[in-house]
Structure formats: C-alpha cells, structure tokens
C-alpha cells in the first residue's frame, strides 16, 4: 500500500509496526480512532517476529522491585498491574497461546508463549477492518509541530518520495537504538558500538532522535541493555543465528574472562553476564562446561517449546572457537591457545571446585548458590561475546506513554512505547514483548483521550 492524499489525516499515527506499534494500533482502532501505521522495513513485525514469543513479566510490582530496585517505580507498577488484562486482550484476538509458564525459565515472573506472527495478522486485520491503514517500506523521518510546539503529524520517506501525515497524536514505537553505533557508544559506553546486534535491522534510534529534536528528554537506565552471550567469532552473523546460538545456559556453567578469571555470579542471569562482559578488556569470555552440564542444559530446550539444538555444535558450525577435551588439563591448554593464561584459568577452576565443595577459599566473583563443578568428561569450552537485543533506556515517558520534556512536562501529542520508552527496567530484564503490549495499549488509550480533548494535558 502507498500513502495517498485521503489517508493523510489520522487521530493516531504509529511509527513502527512491531510489538508496541501493532498492539497500539489495533487497540486504538478498536476504540474507534482513525489510525495509520508507518513501518520502515518491507515487512511488519520488528524484533517481535524474530523472538521466542515468550510473553512474560514479573508476577507483581513487589517481585519486579525485588529484582530491579532502581527501576522506575511508576512504570513498573503500570507494567505489572496491566499485564494480565493485556494478556486477556491477546487471547481475545484469537491468537494461539501456550501456558501459563512459570518462573524457572525466566528466573522469575510468569508468562505465556504466543504465536507472535498470528497476533500481528490479527492486529492488522483489526486495524484495516476499522478503516485504518499500514504502509511498509516507508520510514517516519521527522515530527511536525505547530507554532505552539505541539506535535501535529509526521513526515515520511518511502519509495514514492516524502509525504506529510497530519495526526492528533504520534506514537513512537521504533524499537530502541541498539542498531545505531553512535547512540550506543554515547550512552552504553566504549566498545558498545562493536557489539553484535541481535535485533531487527530497523531499530537504529529514529524514535529517540526524533523525540529529542521535539523537546523530549531521555529516561534513566540509559546505559543498560538487554541481550545474550553469543559465540565468538561468528561468520556472517544474521537472523538465522539469533535463537540457536544464544547461550541462555551460561547461568549453569562457569564463565571466565580473557585473564582466566570469573567476573560474575553466573546464576544472576545471562543478560547480566552479557552486560558485564562489555566492560571487560577485549569483550570476550570463555564458557566452560563438563559433559553433564552440556547434556542437561546446552542440548535441551531452553524454554518450553524452545528449539532443541546442540548450541555448542551450532556455535562451532558458525565459526566459533570451541574445544572438547577428555580432561581438564588439556582443555586449559586448548583455551590457552585463544589467549587465556593457563595458570590463571587452572587457579580459577581449582578455586571454583573447592568453593563449590564448601571450602573457604577466596574467589574472584561471588559463587552461585548451587555451584556445580566440572567433573564428568569430556570437557567443553566456547568463546563468547556480548550482543544487544534492545536498549533499556530511551525516551522519558510517564506511565501513560506520554513523552516528557526535561522539566517533566508532556510534549503535547507525543507518545512512546516498547523499547523506545526507557527506564522500565534497570540493568535487569523482565520481558520485552510485555513492554510493547502493555505500554503500546496504554499509549493508544491515552492518545484517544487526547482526541476528545485536543488540549491534551491531563
Ligand atoms: C531473537 C530474539 C528473541 C527474543 N525473544 C523474546 C521473548 O521470547 N520474549 C520477550 O519478551 N522478548 C523477546 N525479544 C525482545 C522483543 O522482541 C522486543 O523487546 C520487542 O519486539 C520490542 O518491541 P517494540 O515494538 O519496541 O520493537 P520491535 O518489535 O522491534 O518493532 C520496531 C519496529 O519499528 C520499525 N521502525 C524503526 N524505525 C522506524 C521509522 N523511522 N519509521 C517506521 N518504522 C520504524 C522497525 O523496522 C521495527 O519493525 C526477543 C528479541 C529477539 C531479537
């Protein structure tokens, strides 16, 4: 579909057709609004259609706060209080769902596995069935403002050139800034621009930059990001690698840095190890396992209905440094060829084994509460590197998705949701699809209230 003159006026213009954008668009259309969606890529879905489809978050605000005490409390309350109703809305669309699935797979929380592609087909049907529209292969390039500074629409760029769309409200749902080397280096830190990007290719900070240009401020938690350890190196890294190469199981294994030293309590979570690794020299680590660990965690499904693949073998096939040896001493020698000093690695593994047995020894990083030692041969080592899936910081919003300026006042007519809206999580992770679903719908409803009262300041 291309944009034509009669489509150029809407109540809500949504930039980005991923989790937040499509859920918002469908919710707004259901509520009677004229809605237009502009998607930069040729297909809708964003990172959400590449995902494992686990729609989950903390059970309640108390659990979320225990996990992330420094995260924004108002946003956390909104997420956890709306989640169940939002899940029911997904169910009511007729989307296939499996669950509920409990804590162990996420570390905490509760969720459902959903057919994301099925949900999006239904969202598009709801949108188009109520007179809304969606254009693909077209990017929102600029926010338009009236003399008072209020958002009045967007300028787009597509195959047929540039167009302006009038909108009472604009929702930015462009999926975060993980794909932009300048923004990640500025906010996440040095070396972040060299990380693998495990995300759809369209999320390069367009929403963040446009909001900033329109007077919105940045959220807190800007240096945080969600992602997973991936093998190193990987030849020609691409979407086909995203799920089968993810080293979810690092939480059960032993992880050492380039100096052969542990740097984190592995059981905290792969997403924590991933962020910690970015700050270390060389940004490379080695994941160590014995065969019992491999059998139990590496070759099994990481979550219900997850892909059953040997994630070490897949890594080796993709070009990663991987070694299997009959005894620990020869594994240490193999890893030494990757630049990890043998004596230091030997000392680390010895200390780890003694600490795991309950001996009082000094270790470099806290031990997992239930640490397993490398005991059953053969022994495995895989070099890993950090990867980013989405940014935890972004546009500052209130709990309705309303973008806020540096003084905490609304940027009239501007909303953000999903990974574009930052600060819901701090360092930790409590589900990405849930953010898009809950805050996309919240922003849509808030924007409609604005349609009834054009001043829009609640
Ligand atoms: C491999 C993988 C597995 C994952 N597994 C899970 C999981 O199981 N559970 C979970 O909760 N989360 C998971 N996630 C994370 C989840 O997919 C994201 O957090 C979620 O999709 C973010 O939603 P969003 O709407 O903010 O962005 P997205 O869904 O990424 O959508 C953003 C869209 O905006 C478009 N866009 C960008 N710029 C513009 C512009 N200027 N104009 C118009 N369009 C634009 C992009 O092209 C994209 O289509 C996974 C992600 C990946 C990559």
Image: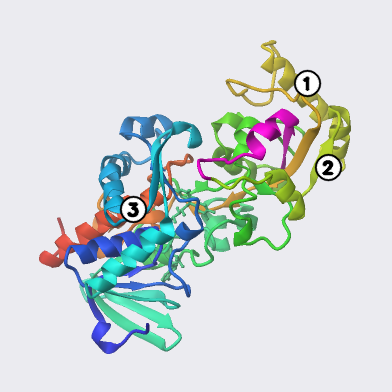
In the displayed structure, 278 sits above or below 326; it is below
Question: Residue 319, image x and y in percent?
Answer: 77, 55
Q: Is mark 2 within 8 Å of ligand 1?
A: no
Where are the magenta residues, as a range? Answer: 285-305
- For this orientation, the residue located farthest to the left is 453
Q: Which residue is mark 2?
A: 339
- Mark in front: 2 vs 3: 3
* Label 1 SS: helix
Query: Residue 350 shows which numbered tag?
Result: 1
Task: Work out whether mark 2 precedes mark 3 in sequence or the reverse, and give the earlier one.
Answer: 2
Question: Residue 170, image x and y in percent?
Answer: 28, 68
- Mark in front: 1 vs 2: 1
Residue 256 lies in quadrant: top right
Instruction: Say whether residue 49 is magenta.
Output: no
Residues at marks 1 and 2, CA–CA distance in whole angstroms? 19 Å
- Could one spot residue 86 in this view of the protein? yes
Residues at marks 3 and 1, CA–CA distance in whole angstroms? 47 Å
Residue at the spot x=77%, y=38% of the render? 381
């Amino acid at each position: 579909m291309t944009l034509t003159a009669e489509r150029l006026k809407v109540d809500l213009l949504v930039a980005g057709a991923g989790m937040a954008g499509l859920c918002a668009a469908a919710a707004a259309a259901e509520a009677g609004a004229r809605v237009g969606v502009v998607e930069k890529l040729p297909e809708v879905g964003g990172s959400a259609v590449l995902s494992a489809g686990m729609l989950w978050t903390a059970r309640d605000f108390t659990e979320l706060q225990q996990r992330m005490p420094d995260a924004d409390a108002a946003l956390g309350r909104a997420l956890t209080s709306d989640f169940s109703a939002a899940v029911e809305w997904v169910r009511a669309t007729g989307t296939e769902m499996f669950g509920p699935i409990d804590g162990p797979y996420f570390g905490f929380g509760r969720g459902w596995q959903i057919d994301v592609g099925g949900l999006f087909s239904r969202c598009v049907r709801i949108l188009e069935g109520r007179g809304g529209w969606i254009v693909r292969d077209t990017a929102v390039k600029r926010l338009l403002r009236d003399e008072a500074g209020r958002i009045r629409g967007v300028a787009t760029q597509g195959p047929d050139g540039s167009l302006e769309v009038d909108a009472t409200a604009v929702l930015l749902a462009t999926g975060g800034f993980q794909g932009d080397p300048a923004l990640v280096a500025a906010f996440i830190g040095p070396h972040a621009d060299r990380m693998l990007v495990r995300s759809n290719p369209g999320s390069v900070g367009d929403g963040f930059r446009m909001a900033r240009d329109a007077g919105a401020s940045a959220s807190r938690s800007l240096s945080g990001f969600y992602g997973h350890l991936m093998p190193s190196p990987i030849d020609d890294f691409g979407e086909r690698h995203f799920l089968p190469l993810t080293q979810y199981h690092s939480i059960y294994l032993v992880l050492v840095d380039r100096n052969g030293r542990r740097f984190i309590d592995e059981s905290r979570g792969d997403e924590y190890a991933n962020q910690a690794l970015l700050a270390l020299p060389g940004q490379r680590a080695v994941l160590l396992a014995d065969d019992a660990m491999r059998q139990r965690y590496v070759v099994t499904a990481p979550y219900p209905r997850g892909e059953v693949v040997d994630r070490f073998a897949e890594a080796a096939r993709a070009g990663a440094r991987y070694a299997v040896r009959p005894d620990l001493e020869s594994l240490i020698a193999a890893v030494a060829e990757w630049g990890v000093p043998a004596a230091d690695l030997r000392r680390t593994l010895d200390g780890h084994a003694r600490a795991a047995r309950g001996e009082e020894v000094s270790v470099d990083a806290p031990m997992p509460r239930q640490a397993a030692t490398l005991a059953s041969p053969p022994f495995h080592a895989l070099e890993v590197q950090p990867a980013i899936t989405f940014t935890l910081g972004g546009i500052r919003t209130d709990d309705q998705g309303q973008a806020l300026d540096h003084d905490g006042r609304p940027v009239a007519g501007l909303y953000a949701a999903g990974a574009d809206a930052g600060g819901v999580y701090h360092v930790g992770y409590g589900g990405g699809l849930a953010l898009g679903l809950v805050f996309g719908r919240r922003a849509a409803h808030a924007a409609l209230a604005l349609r009834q009262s054009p001043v829009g300041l609640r």
